[in-house]
Image (cartoon, rainbow, N blue to C red):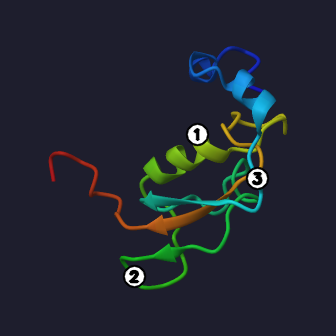
């Protein structure tokens, strides 16, 4: 929805529409996002997320407590044409969230 309102100027800057004429991605290819995790309930991502891993707690719950990993995953794979949120670069690929950083790791003051 926001793509049509020119909110996502970055997609036109990288000529995403020309790329989408070639491919919109592949649901069989999984992209690992190694970051602060991913918001597992995010409306634009929840159907794109595969099983992931939390390196910090040694478990399978890589939920984002910072927001950075969710932002990165959204740029890559937010559901497109769902009338919600933003458009991702890939329309079909899945995201495997790997939580390798906690909420405070990205702050330069810590």
- The image quarter containing residue 52 is bottom right
Whole-percent x and y of residue 88?
67, 38
Residue plotted at (74% across, 23% down): 17
Q: Secondary structure at mark 1?
A: helix
Labels 2 & 1 near each other (Cβ < 8 A): no
Residue 75 — which label?
Answer: 1
Whichever of labels 3 and 1 marks the residue nearer the N terminus, that label is 3
Q: Is 83 displayed left or right of 14 in the figure? A: right
In this view, the residue farthest toward the front is 22
Q: Quadrant of the N terminus?
A: top right
Labels 2 & 3 near each other (Cβ < 8 A): no
- The image quarter containing residue 108 is top left
Q: Nearer the viewer, residue 32 or 23?
A: 23
In this view, the residue farthest toward the left is 109
Whole-percent x and y of residue 97?
54, 64
Residue 26 — which label?
Answer: 3
Q: Nearer the viewer, residue 102 or 55?
A: 55
Q: Is 62 displayed left or right of 35 in the figure? A: right
Q: Is residue 65 above or below residue 62?
A: above
Residue plotted at (77% across, 40% down): 24
Q: Which residue is mark 2?
A: 57
Residue 12 — which label?
Answer: none
Q: Secondary structure at mark 3?
A: loop
């Amino acid at each position: 929805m926001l793509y049509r309102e020119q909110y996502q100027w970055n997609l036109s800057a990288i000529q995403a529409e020309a790329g989408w004429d070639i491919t919109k991605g592949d649901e069989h290819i999984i992209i690992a996002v190694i970051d602060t995790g991913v918001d597992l309930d995010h409306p634009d991502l929840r159907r794109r997320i595969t099983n992931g891993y939390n390196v910090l707690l040694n478990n399978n719950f890589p939920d984002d407590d910072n927001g950075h990993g969710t932002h990165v995953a959204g740029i890559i794979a937010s559901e497109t044409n769902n009338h919600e949120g933003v458009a991702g670069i890939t329309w079909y690929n899945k995201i495997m969230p790997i939580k390798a950083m906690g909420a405070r790791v990205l702050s330069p003051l810590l």
